[in-house]
Amino acid sequence: MSSKKIDGKAIGQEIREELKEQVASLVKQGYQPGLAVILVGENPASQTYVKNKEKSSIEAGMKSELIKLPDTVSEEDLLKEVEKLNQDDSIDGILVQLPLPKHIDENKVIRAISPEKDVDGFHPMNVGKMLIGQQTFLPCTPYGIMQLLERSGVEIAGKHAVIIGRSNIVGKPMGQLLLQKDATVTYCHSRTNDLKSFTKQADILIVAIGMAKFITGDYIKEGAVVIDVGMNRDENGKLCGDVDYASAEQVASAITPVPGGVGPMTITMLLKNTVESAENKLNSRTKN
Ligand code: NAP
């Protein structure tokens, strides 16, 4: 069996085209949505992510603001920058690129971002809202995966979804979003005994571990849908996922590649959250 490739690049592009139209319509009404990104230090991976976010928001027609701070910046000064952006009426989304230097408390910084501008969906208030199924900003990677599944016509209700990984930004919220769409959800992690006995039961298998090509075809049930969140380098320095694509695609009915699967969706959903934030603001103004 050769499986269908779930093309994150194409689906991401489709959503970005929709966003462009939404932004154009807001601009026509006299308002340009704005995304601000704070980058602390010189971490090369963070610099690349931030550059991509800036480029993508400009392509969508949005205002983009980058605030670069040295890695010696104090927590107090960083919090002041966040507060300035909270008060800035031209900014709808605030993102602080993680990780932060060790002397800064990441949780404190996340809590300082106004929940109305928390387009990463990391603020505890938004995490709580997501958990109880209220309208809020969803964390971008799991939100993007839901879009991949839905736009590829994957049935979720009644299916057994197995998630490997329980991080706050991927695994945990992923399970909650699938549960809300009526999947039966199992979480696995590094302390799970006999991982394969769980993955073999999965109709939908989400892999977010951070270990190159860890999940091979023999972990996968015939006909399962496999979503590979991992971003690793293989022995030749080439970008690869947590799933061994060559053996997995022999068994799966559909699978995301790396690159070109989940990756392009994450930034797309960040833009979508920012546009939604701008729309919320304008709607609340017309109501008042
Ligand atoms: P993380 O915080 O390091 O979490 C990894 C999870 O995998 C943990 O829950 C860990 O279990 C579990 N795990 C580790 N070894 C395992 C094993 N042998 N068997 C079963 N579970 C195991 O990572 P993350 O932030 O969720 O990211 C996961 C991967 O996704 C990384 O490769 C990351 O680069 C990638 N990622 C990609 C995107 C994207 O946009 N494409 C976005 C975010 C992350 P414990 O909890 O027990 O330690």
Image (cartoon, rainbow, N blue to C red):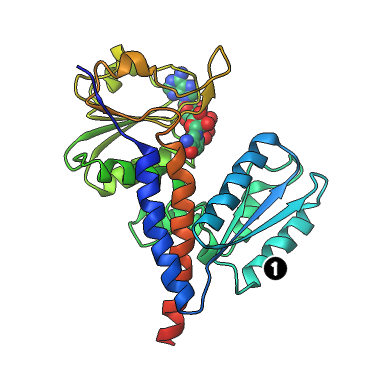
Q: Residue at x 70, y 68 (%)?
A: 84
- Residue closest to the eye, 139 or 188: 139
Q: Residue at x 78, y 58 (%)?
A: 77
- Residue closest to the eye, 22 or 127: 22
Q: Is residue 204 toward the left or the right of residue 127 in the image?
A: left
Q: Is residue 121 above or below residue 156?
A: below
Res. 216 visible in picture? no
Write down the residue under mark 1: 84
Q: Quadrant of the N terminus?
A: top left
Residue 247 occupies quadrant: top left
Q: Quadrant of the C terminus?
A: bottom left
Q: Is residue 88 above or below residue 10?
A: below
- Identify the residue at the far left of this view: 158
Q: Is residue 212 toward the left or the right of residue 109 in the image?
A: left
| Amino acid tagged 1 | Lys
Image coordinates for residue 142, horizontal then vertical, percent: 40, 43
Res. 205 visible in picture? yes
Q: Secondary structure at mark 1?
A: helix
User: How many marks can you see?
Assistant: 1
Q: Is residue 32 above or below residue 102?
A: below
Image coordinates for residue 112, horizontal then vertical, percent: 63, 60
